[in-house]
Amino acid sequence: MTSASAPLVSIRALHKSYGPHIQVLKGLDIEMKPGERVVVIGPSGGGKSTLLRVVMGLEKIDSGSVTFGGRPYISSAGAGAKTVIDTEVRRSIGMVFQHYTLFPHLSVVQNLVLAPCKVRGEKKASAVRRAEALLERFGLAAKANAYPAQLSGGQKQRVAIARALMLDPKLMLFDEVTSALDPELVAEVEQVILQLAGQDMPMMIVTHDMWFAKNIASRVIFCAGGVVVEDGPPEQVLGAPREERTREFIDRVFHIKQ
């Protein structure tokens, strides 16, 4: 167990490239404390989604390390060395992607119970009870036996969030979860994530929605060029950024008036 002040996630000197010419993360350093809600913003190609995929254990790294709850999680010594990932730690982390990734041939409730039953050996009846409780909480009780093709984009994304929560994660990662949705469906997904925030679920979120970032973040990190350019509370980073690169980005892309 970590103390309240010890980091939940500690990322040190993280380097990640795709082939010899595309260096995406260039020595990234981030610490995240328990209960924090960190929103990562920045230009396309700045490494935001790659960062989340690394933390989820989905990408090999060139060098650096990630610890979780004070425990070594991901590491590589560099120069072609193998990426070492503690799969037990990885099971403590849940991730929701931009494009839902639901199994189309399974009903909503079947999507939710698959991992707990397969990964943990949970009894199906117990998993179904928990799944139904989550669906009720997210306003989806009537959709338990529907299939993904019968759902709206917002409903699919809420199911994807419920599915991730079925494994009782200690950290949730959200990668542009509203960017594929019609504008009128965005609010229903954001409300679910705000609900989790109200229960102190630690989360790292990549989003282009500045209203959402401002309302959910306890910290905002601006990444560009594979490094952290600015890191601070949302009112500072979004409202009065200190770095010229951050100011340019916010003025140009998000039109937030200083």
Image (cartoon, rainbow, N blue to C red):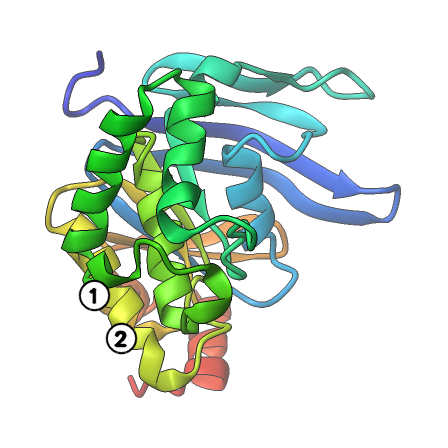
Q: CA distance from mark 1 to mark 2?
A: 6 Å
Task: Looking at the picture, tell me which residue is in the foreground, 66 or 176.
Answer: 176
180 above or below 80? below
**At 21% across and 45% down in the image, what residue appears?**
132
Quick check: 39 left or right of 227?
Answer: left
**Residue 29 in sight in this render:** yes
Total number of numbered discs in the rendering:
2
Residue identifier under label 2: 187
- Residue type at mark 1: give it: Gln
What x and y, as percent, mark residue 108?
39, 52
140 above or below 186? above
Is there a contact, CB below 8 Å, between mark 1 and mark 2?
Answer: yes
Task: Looking at the picture, tell me which residue is in the foreground, 208 or 175.
Answer: 175
For numbered disc 2, what is the local secondary structure?
Answer: helix
* Residue 70 placement: quadrant: top left
What x and y, as percent, mark residue 1?
22, 11
**At 25% across and 57% down in the image, what residue appears?**
193
Mark 2 surroundings: few (<14), some (14-19) or many (≥20) residues within 10 A: some
